[in-house]
Image (cartoon, rainbow, N blue to C red):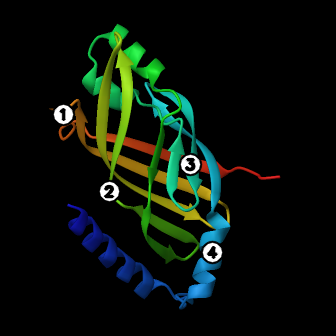
Amino acid sequence: MKLLKLAVYSLLMCFVMSCSESATEINEKTAQQMYNSIRGTYVGNVMVDNIPQTVYVSIANDFSVRQLPLKPILGHIFNKESELTQALASAKGIIFSAPTDQMTIIKENIYLSMVPTDWVFSVTVNDQTYQVTAMTESEAFVNYSTNVLTLNMDVTELLCNGKSYDVKTNRINYYIDIANKQKTE
């Protein structure tokens, strides 16, 4: 699937670049400067149950997301509201992190693709610890002139204490649009 995405994306890139009259070669130094300009922390919202929830996305040595709502993931595992509430309460402070494996520059946008990552974290329900593993594929677009980020994170497989949960028919996607870069003092 990732290979198919890459092939489609590559064809799209070829089309965009061939249609662009302003397509210019970008040397390695310029690319590094562009990448450095987008490094930092972005604040945006993810909609969960039609309620916006604030998240923090950091682009540094790795790509990380803090305060990512876990209800879409844990709701697949814990069916009872009381158990889900306990799991969510014990999951505070969990951070998703993945290395960036590809950077592509398209006009004023930088496309970042992250290495598919097994996100492992623990939650506690009724004094029992559950180990959750969410296999993720993530990508982001950052407009380096406006510092606006668009993130898509896709949970492709979900395990809890070794038991598999079906997310294939009900894909879990996190989509942050219009996340703005925080000012640093």
Q: Is residue 80 left or right of residue 85?
A: left
- Label 3 and label 4: CA atoms lie apart by 18 Å
Q: Amino acid at mark 4?
A: Met
Q: Position of residue 32 (x, y in %)?
A: 60, 78
Does label 3 or label 4 sit earlier along the sequence?
4
Given the image, on which type of amino acid does mark 2 rest? Pro
Return the residue at label 1.
162
Residue 110 rendering spot, x and y as whole percentages: 53, 69
Neighbours of disc 2 within 10 Å: few (<14), some (14-19), many (20+): some
Answer with mark 2 or mark 4, whichever residue precedes in sequence: 4
Q: Judge depth for marks 2 and 1 and give the one in front.
A: 1
Q: Report if the CB atoms under discs 4 and 1 are less than 8 Å apart.
A: no
Residue at the right extreme? 185
Up/down of 14 relative to 131, above or below: below
Q: Tell me the element at label 3.
A: strand
Residue 139 relative to residue 53: left or right: left
